[in-house]
Amino acid sequence: MTGDLDERVQFGIEGLDAMLGGGLLHRSICAIVGTYGTGKTTFALQFVYEGLARGEKAIFISLDERAEMIHDDIRRKGWDLDGYLGTSLYVVKLDPTDFTVAINQIRDELPRLIRNVGATRVVIDPISLFEGIFTDDAKRRQELYRFVEMMRDESCTLLLTSETLQNNPYASKYSLVEYMVDTVILLRYIRPSDLSEVHPAAEVVKMRGSNHSREIKPYEILKDRVQVYSEANVF
Ligand SMILES: Nc1ncnc2c1ncn2[C@@H]1O[C@H](COP(=O)(O)OP(=O)(O)OP(=O)(O)O)[C@@H](O)[C@H]1O
Ligand SMILES: [Mg+2]
């Protein structure tokens, strides 16, 4: 195996990178699956910011929060935004309710944008809103597959986030992305047997082409970063 094939794209979350065997594989596709408020957007922002700090370029496509809200999220963390925005960071808000526009933007304009910017890290937050555009299951599967295949031609590492269904915190809303992406990180709440308080915990469920931790590790969203405690146990 050449060094290139095993090149790691660090998340910038120390404990998580350790669980991933050093980071995501270069040009791979990762999904972060978690219920509302588990920190999907926060993890994705940290992934983007790690790239910027390394001199890379990044595109953050938001399907729920407005671009200004994403900007504020970044500023609130105390991270430099103005030094990157428009030069190496592009935050784009797409409106998933406008069916044709959203599909065309993602399908036709995203590859061009990635190439023009020279982005090596791309986030779509959350992909479940794109999936939700399609009312027919077969069509949804087909379109998501087409999108993932299209993204495999781009020389970037792609991070998708996905909501879960309320009654199943283990699976993405449409139970599709898990099968199509290379890496799945599951974020969920764990309630200890004494019911004292819930703890958020992360787990690498799947990682094609790499060894990875199978342990469930607690994490905390701090003001300026996410901390995954890879040495600690939740139980
Ligand atoms: N400054 C902060 N300090 C501590 N915790 C914070 C801070 N900001 C956000 N959080 C925590 O992060 C959670 C929200 O994270 P985030 O928006 O990344 O979640 P999400 O999974 O993307 O949610 P959604 O599905 O609603 O988009 C909050 O519910 C809160 O618990
Ligand atoms: Mg979010």
Image: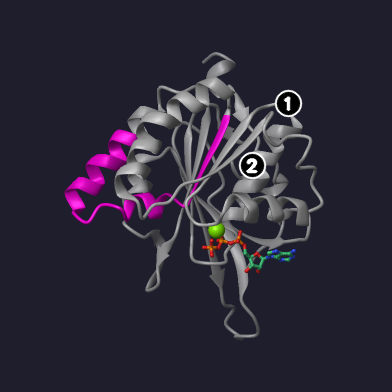
Compared with 46, 27 (above or below) is above
Q: Which residue occupies 63% across, 71% down?
A: 199
Residue 91 horizontal/vertical position (percent): 59, 42
Residue 96 horizontal/vertical position (percent): 39, 52
30 left or right of 50?
A: left
Quarter residue 65 falls in = bottom right
Q: Earlier in the sequence, mark 1 or mark 2?
A: 2
**Label 1: how many residues lie within 10 Å, few (<14), some (14-19) or many (20+)?**
few
Residue 158 horizontal/vertical position (percent): 50, 36
Q: Which residue is mark 2?
A: 47
Q: Nearer the viewer, residue 134 or 164?
A: 134
Q: Which residue is mark 1?
A: 55
Compared with 104, 154 (above or below) is above
Q: Nearer the viewer, residue 76 or 26?
A: 76
Ligand 1 picture quarter: bottom right
Specify start and end residues of the magenta stretch as a single range. 121-147
**Residue type, label 2:** Phe
Q: Which residue occupies 36% across, 30% down?
A: 108
Colouring of the image:
one colour
Compared with 64, 91 (above or below) is above
Q: CA distance from mark 1 to mark 2?
A: 13 Å
Quadrant of the snapshot with the C terminus: bottom right
Mark seen at residue 189: none
Q: Which residue occupies 37% across, 49% down?
A: 130
12 left or right of 25?
A: right
Residue 222 horizontal/vertical position (percent): 76, 61
